[in-house]
Amino acid sequence: ITDARRAAADFSVPYLTVDQGVLLGLQTTTRPTSIADLRGMRLCAQAASTGADLVTGTIQPTQAPLLPASVVTLTRALRVGNCEALVYDAPSLAYLRAQVPSRYGPFAGVIRTGESYGAVFPKGSRLRGPVNRAIAALKRDGTLAGIQRTWLSADLTKATVLR
């Protein structure tokens, strides 16, 4: 959920807050510990995403980043060495690495962005109220926390924070 996206669509209340993560390739020899360390690396992020905005606006790498449109192309670029580090939603990257650790290098850390996820609706949708109530109920009874534990199982509270 971003202000720019709110101009085109309505959103539910947030159901998840995430930061951006940095996953390294198997061939990557440098382990970044800061945003400054990332500037000298070949980075990739999904085009038109908050990760791409972070790479181009905040990190500002010295080499042009690779910004493919699809996640499949993005993860393949990291696996085959077209980039040294991938910037993407931290829970997704941590889960991906946990599922197939032999395909990826280490999870380098997170960059605090505090992004909110929510359901997206056409402007003025009457579904927004019922979905907001459903999300509130899922939070209240613990279902949402259980889903997050099951599907976003990596504990990112101990991840290195890249500043």
Image (cartoon, helix red, strand yellow):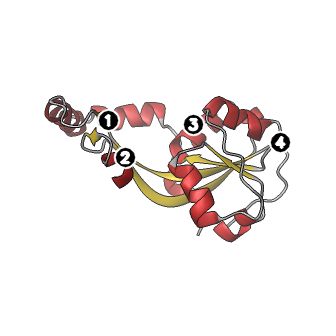
- Write down the residue under mark 4: 81
For the point 77% across and 54% down, the residue is 42
Q: How far is disc 4 from disc 2 in space, using C-alphas?
A: 32 Å
What is the secondary structure assignment of the residue under circle 2? helix
Name the amino acid, label 1. Val
> Dividing the picture into quarters, in which one does residue 13 lie?
top left
User: Is there any visible trace of residue 140 in the rendered image?
Assistant: yes
From the viewer's perspective, is 129 left or right of 53?
left
- Write down the residue under mark 3: 95
For the point 81% across and 59% down, the residue is 30
Q: How far is disc 1 from disc 4 in space, using C-alphas?
A: 34 Å
Residue 138 x %, y %: 23, 33
What is the secondary structure assignment of the residue under circle 1? strand
The crowding category of the residue bearing disc 1, from other C-alpha atoms within 10 Å (few below 14, some 14 to 19, many at least 20), is: some
Tag 2 or tag 4, which sits nearer the N-term?
A: 2
Nearer-the-camera pick, 24 or 48: 48
* Closer to the eye: label 4 or 3: 4
Callout 1–callout 2 Cβ contact below 8 Å: yes
For the point 78% across and 47% down, the residue is 83
* Closer to the eye: label 4 or 2: 2
Name the amino acid, label 3. Tyr
Tag 2 or tag 1, which sits nearer the N-term?
A: 2
| Residue 120, disc | 1
Q: How far is disc 3 from disc 1 in space, using C-alphas?
A: 23 Å
Name the amino acid, label 4. Gly
- Write down the residue under mark 2: 5
What is the secondary structure assignment of the residue under circle 3? helix
Image vertical order of residue 110 relative to residue 58, above or below: above
Q: How far is disc 1 from disc 2 in space, using C-alphas?
A: 9 Å
For the point 38% across and 31% down, the residue is 147
Nearer-the-camera pick, 86 or 100: 86
